[in-house]
């Protein structure tokens, strides 16, 4: 139910305080039997889930951000959740080598203190290195603190918590349609996520062939458990348990209890595990016999152990084949969950029909020679395969590309992720023409490609730069010049032909008519506030020009933005106000700089300047 960050909190003592009476109550009622030997039967399979090709109305992909070359973050707009939900995908080894292949999926759920920026699985474990050679799409929802990944009866502190609807109705069609997910699925999770994995598998047996719980709480309505969950949710973010399933112990609580619905898992492949709470290989001994220093983790794992046992007893009594691993030691911590995930993998692979053998691979020729020079690439994941214009081999920490013209070059790390986002060799950059190289200022790295480059720095991340914008940037000193490193990718304007790209020193706008132009500082802020190139101003036609009295201007297709330290930046559009101001000598005349935006009134237009006001009515301008 908790991550290691919770263990240091004195509030987590609720686990140890509740453990003793809960154990006594379950033993006294006959609910808790002695641990049984581990079962190794992988369980049965069931008929394929029906494939859904169309997402419900309103579900859409808002944003894609590549974290590495094989991990991508999606922001999926969810009508049920009333927001865009981040979901990260870990892509299989053959993703690039076999672009027409579809894959089974594994939905991997987080714990009670799930964060909003990334899944605990990627933050606390090394699953990226475990799954990169596997041929399954790993689906990692981000967020959902204290949610139990269920549909809540009322809002969760102002948020719409409708996780079950999102994960089983809204998200799957999008993944099947756009991310090559096939029709065989599993679900697994740790702690809270383990509880949720079993609930989802029971409530959607037509979808999930495999379900696993690592230290989950699989008996949620027996003596003391609703109260324990209530205290835990209050501790992990202050969430009211009654908002989730109504009054403690109500029918909705009964409907969500994995133990009470174990019979629904007949035919599914089920894996559960729990430690004993005693000091294990990843714990520090306290000096007391078998008791670790992680005392909250001891109490939480004890709760998991006894509730998992009651679930196993009920499931096996109902004819469900369960692989149950009750470990002789171990607390409620991430190293044990990573271990259990690797132990459960063969059973998942069998359930969804993938071969649990990592195929042998080897690199050859110039790619092999480069890999020998760059051991940090790690082992190969694929054999050599064809790409546009050449060959490629994927390694654990990067990809190597070869072409007759450019030879072999590696693309790794954040630059590799940005290259993947650009479409790799099939995208506008083409093949790499260099390995990753340190920038002259020593702060960043870059790779060059046939049609551009990707630059990275710790503060700006990795971004591609190409075409006329790259030429302008290069002529002005590249990352060592006033523009600095790129801070965004090049973005194509869907409304007006042109592109825009951000840099540390400003933003460059390009159109076929105007070419690349830099807009910066307060003038840039005013330009964006006005709607930038999509406004009546259009694209910039020039760059910032210094003026008398310490001011500056930038000209645009539909007007000019003037700035001075006294008045700030204001748009003066083309038309009668601008023309009337010109008759007075612009900012050099008696009116000075504009000090307000142009206002439209029932009578016409009004704009205020340092030395007066220009009013336009019936097409006639008056200066006062």
Image: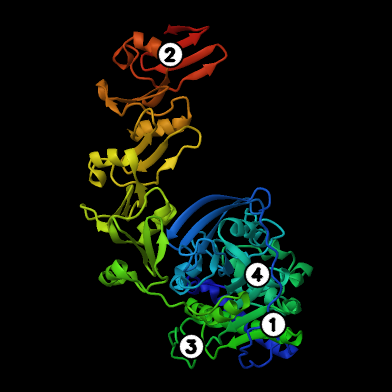
Q: Secondary structure at mark 3?
A: loop
593 is higher (above) or lower (below) than 197: above
Residue that mark 2 sits on: 577
Viewer-nearest residue: 227 or 525: 525
The quarter of the picture where the C terminus appears is top left
> Which mark's residue is nearer the viewer, 3 or 2?
2
Tag shown at residue 279: 3
Identify residue for label 1. 311
Q: Earlier along the polypeptide chain: callout 1 or callout 4? A: 4
Residue 575 seen anywhere in this rendered image of the structure = yes
Residue 444 screen position, x and y as percent: 27, 55
What's the mark number on residue 230? 4
SS under mark 4: helix
Mark 2 Cα shell of 10 Å, populated few (<14), some (14-19), many (≥20) = many
Vertical relation: 259 (above or below) 49? below
Local packing at callout 1 (Cα closer than 10 Å; few below 14, some 14-19, many 20+) is many
In this rendering, the label closer to the viewer, 4 or 3 = 3
Mark 3 neighbour density, 10 Å: few (under 14) some (14–19) many (20 or more): many
Give the mark nearest the N terminus, 2 or 4.
4
Image quadrant of residue 613? top left
- Residues at circles 4 and 3 in contact by the CB criterion of under 8 Å: no
Identify the mark nearer the N-term, 3 or 2: 3
Per the image, label 1 sits on a secondary structure element best described as: helix
Relative horizontal placement of residue 414, taking residue 339 as reference (left or right): left
Marks 1 and 4 sit apart, C-alpha to C-alpha, by 20 Å
Report the disc number at residue 2: none
């Amino acid at each position: 139910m908790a991550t290691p960050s919770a263990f240091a909190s004195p509030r987590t003592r609720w686990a140890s305080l509740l453990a003793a009476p809960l154990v006594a109550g379950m033993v006294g009622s006959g609910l808790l039997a002695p641990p049984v030997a581990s079962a190794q039967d992988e369980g049965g399979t069931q008929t394929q889930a029906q494939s859904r090709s169309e997402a419900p109305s309103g579900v859409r992909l808002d944003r894609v951000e590549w974290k590495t070359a094989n991990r991508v973050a999606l922001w999926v707009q969810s009508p049920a959740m009333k927001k865009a939900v981040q979901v990260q995908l870990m892509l299989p080894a053959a993703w690039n080598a076999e672009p027409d292949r579809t894959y089974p999926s594994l939905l991997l759920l987080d714990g009670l203190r799930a964060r909003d920026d990334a899944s605990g699985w990627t933050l606390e474990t090394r699953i990226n290195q475990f799954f990169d050679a596997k041929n399954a799409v790993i689906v990692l929802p981000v967020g959902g603190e204290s949610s139990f990944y269920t549909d809540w009866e009322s809002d969760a502190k102002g948020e719409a918590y409708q996780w079950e609807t999102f994960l089983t109705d809204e998200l799957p069609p999008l993944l099947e349609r756009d991310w090559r997910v096939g029709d065989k699925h599993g679900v697994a999770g740790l702690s809270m996520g383990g509880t949720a994995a079993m609930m989802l598998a029971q409530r959607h047996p037509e979808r999930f062939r495999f379900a696993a719980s690592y230290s989950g709480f699989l008996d949620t309505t027996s003596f003391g458990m609703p109260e324990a969950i209530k205290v835990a949710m209050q501790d992990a973010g202050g969430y009211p348990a009654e908002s989730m399933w109504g009054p403690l112990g109500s029918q909705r609580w009964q409907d969500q209890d994995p133990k009470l619905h174990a019979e629904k898992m007949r035919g599914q492949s089920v894996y559960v595990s729990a430690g004993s709470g005693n000091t294990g290989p990843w714990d520090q001994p306290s000096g007391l016999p078998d008791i670790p220093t992680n005392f909250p983790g001891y109490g939480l794992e004890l709760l998991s152990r006894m509730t998992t046992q009651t679930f196993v007893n009920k499931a096996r009594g109902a004819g469900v084949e369960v692989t149950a691993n009750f470990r002789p030691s171990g607390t409620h911590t991430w190293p044990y969950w990573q271990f259990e995930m690797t132990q459960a993998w063969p059973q998942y692979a069998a359930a969804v029909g993938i071969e649990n053998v990592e195929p042998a691979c080897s690199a050859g020729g110039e790619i092999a020679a480069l890999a020998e020079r760059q051991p940090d690439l790690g082992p190969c994941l694929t054999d050599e395969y064809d790409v546009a214009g050449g060959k490629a081999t994927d390694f654990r920490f990067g990809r190597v590309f070869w072409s007759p013209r450019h030879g072999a070059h590696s693309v790794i790390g954040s630059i590799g992720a940005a290259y993947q986002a650009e479409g790799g060799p099939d995208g506008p950059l083409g093949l790499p023409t260099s390995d990753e190289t340190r920038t002259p200022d020593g702060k960043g790295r870059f790779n060059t490609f046939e049609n551009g480059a990707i630059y990275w720095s710790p503060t700006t991340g990795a971004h591609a730069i190409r075409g006329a914008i790259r030429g302008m940037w290069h002529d002005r000193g590249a990352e060592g010049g006033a523009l600095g490193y790129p801070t965004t990718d090049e973005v194509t304007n869907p409304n007006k032909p042109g592109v825009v790209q951000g840099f540390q020193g400003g933003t460059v706008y390009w159109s076929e008519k105007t070419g690349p132009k830099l807009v910066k500082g307060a003038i840039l802020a005013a330009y964006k506030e006005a709607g930038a190139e999509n406004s009546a101003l259009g694209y910039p036609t020039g760059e910032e020009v210094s003026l008398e009295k310490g001011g500056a201007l930038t000209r645009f297709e539909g007007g000019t933005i003037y700035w001075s330290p006294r008045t700030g930046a204001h748009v003066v559009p083309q038309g009668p106000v601008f023309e009337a101001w010109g008759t007075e000598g612009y900012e050099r005349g008696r009116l000075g700089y504009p000090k307000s935006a142009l206002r439209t009134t029932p009578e016409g237009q009004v704009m205020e300047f340092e030395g007066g006001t220009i009013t336009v009515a019936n097409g006639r301008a008056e200066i006062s």
